[in-house]
Image (spheres, rainbow, N blue to C red):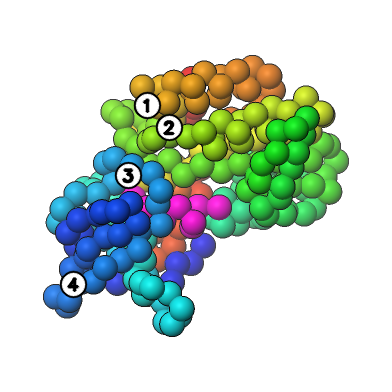
């Protein structure tokens, strides 16, 4: 996926969850929107190189958006809104093993299996087998040899797991995709120390038939791509 034109800078601070002060390469200091509701642990530090996108939309309060941060090993994608389109692009190209052979991909689909209502990110249908309901989570929390999710307690994440398990019970496929949006880490594990309920439920739904995948997101030049699968350690 091609990103919009990017501008280099260095981050000064992140505050009020959605704001970041950034000094651009030309010396200007701007306030950028930070489209990431998580704690962003390990995703920024004062002085770290960043790249921003710019919007000319007059309705926006902030013209600049924080896209990615370099913490020393390469770009970390911090704009969580970019991840779903990248995964969708890979699915369209049939580049995700096990999720091929479908004729149509739909986005942002509301489901309510057995009363577990949720809006899931992607649905693959018109295939030879059951439809595949896919939820995507952006993963950026580093912990030694792996990346973890979530970086804060996630009640919404639990609801998504419940919906996927209910869909599987109805004969559909439920697929949980963890998109590792930074270069470090050899595999994925849930963040049990931060949200033990999420880790327990993830293991339960896996045993109930929900499929769990981890995909690496790479950041070559001004693009984002799925570069391949990585191990899931539960």
Between disc 4 and disc 1, whose residue precedes? 4
> Which mark, residue 29?
4
Do the residues under discs 4 and 3 have CB atoms within 8 angstroms?
no
Magenta region includes residue 106: no
Between disc 1 and disc 3, whose residue precedes? 3
Q: SS of the residue at dot 4?
A: strand
Magenta region includes residue 81: yes
| Structural crowding at the residue carrying mark 4, measured as other residues with C-alpha within 10 Å and reported as few (<14), some (14–19) or many (≥20) | some
Q: Is residue 77 left or right of residue 116?
A: left
Q: CA distance from mark 2 to mark 3?
A: 13 Å
Q: SS of the residue at dot 2?
A: loop
Between disc 2 and disc 3, whose residue precedes? 3
Between disc 4 and disc 3, whose residue precedes? 4
Identify the magenta region.
Answer: 76-84
Q: CA distance from mark 1 to mark 2?
A: 7 Å
Residue 66 at what x, y percent from top left? 34, 62
Q: Quadrant of residue 56?
A: bottom left
> Which mark, residue 40?
3
Do the residues under discs 1 and 2 have CB atoms within 8 angstroms?
yes
Q: Which label sits in the foreground, 2 or 3?
A: 2
Between disc 1 and disc 2, whose residue precedes? 2
For label 1, the residue is: 194
Q: How many marks?
A: 4
Q: Quadrant of residue 104?
A: bottom right
| Structural crowding at the residue carrying mark 1, measured as other residues with C-alpha within 10 Å and reported as few (<14), some (14–19) or many (≥20) | some
Do the residues under discs 4 and 1 have CB atoms within 8 angstroms?
no
For label 2, the residue is: 153
Residue shown at the point (31%, 30%) measured from the top left:
143
Residue 188 at what x, y percent from top left? 44, 30
């Amino acid at each position: 996926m091609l990103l919009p034109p990017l501008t280099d800078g260095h981050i000064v601070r992140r505050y009020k969850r959605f704001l970041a002060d950034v000094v651009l390469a030309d010396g200007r200091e701007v306030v950028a929107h930070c489209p990431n509701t998580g704690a962003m642990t390990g995703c920024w530090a004062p002085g770290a190189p960043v790249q921003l996108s710019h919007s000319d939309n007059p309705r926006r309060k902030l013209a600049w958006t924080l896209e990615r941060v370099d913490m020393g090993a390469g770009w970390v994608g911090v704009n969580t809104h970019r991840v779903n389109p990248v995964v969708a692009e890979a699915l369209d190209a049939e580049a995700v093993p096990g999720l091929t052979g479908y004729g149509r991909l739909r986005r942002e689909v509301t489901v309510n299996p057995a009363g577990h209502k949720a809006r899931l990110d992607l649905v693959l249908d018109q295939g030879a087998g059951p439809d595949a309901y896919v939820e995507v989570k952006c993963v950026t929390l580093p912990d030694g040899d792996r990346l973890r999710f979530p970086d804060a307690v996630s009640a919404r994440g639990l609801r998504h797991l419940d919906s996927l398990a209910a869909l599987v019970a109805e004969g559909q496929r439920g697929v949980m995709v963890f998109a590792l949006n930074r270069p470090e880490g050899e595999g994925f594990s849930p963040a049990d120390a931060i949200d033990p309920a999420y880790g327990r439920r993830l293991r339960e739904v896996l045993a109930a038939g929900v499929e769990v995948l981890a995909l690496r997101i790479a950041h070559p030049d001004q693009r984002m791509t799925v570069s391949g699968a990585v191990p899931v350690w539960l």
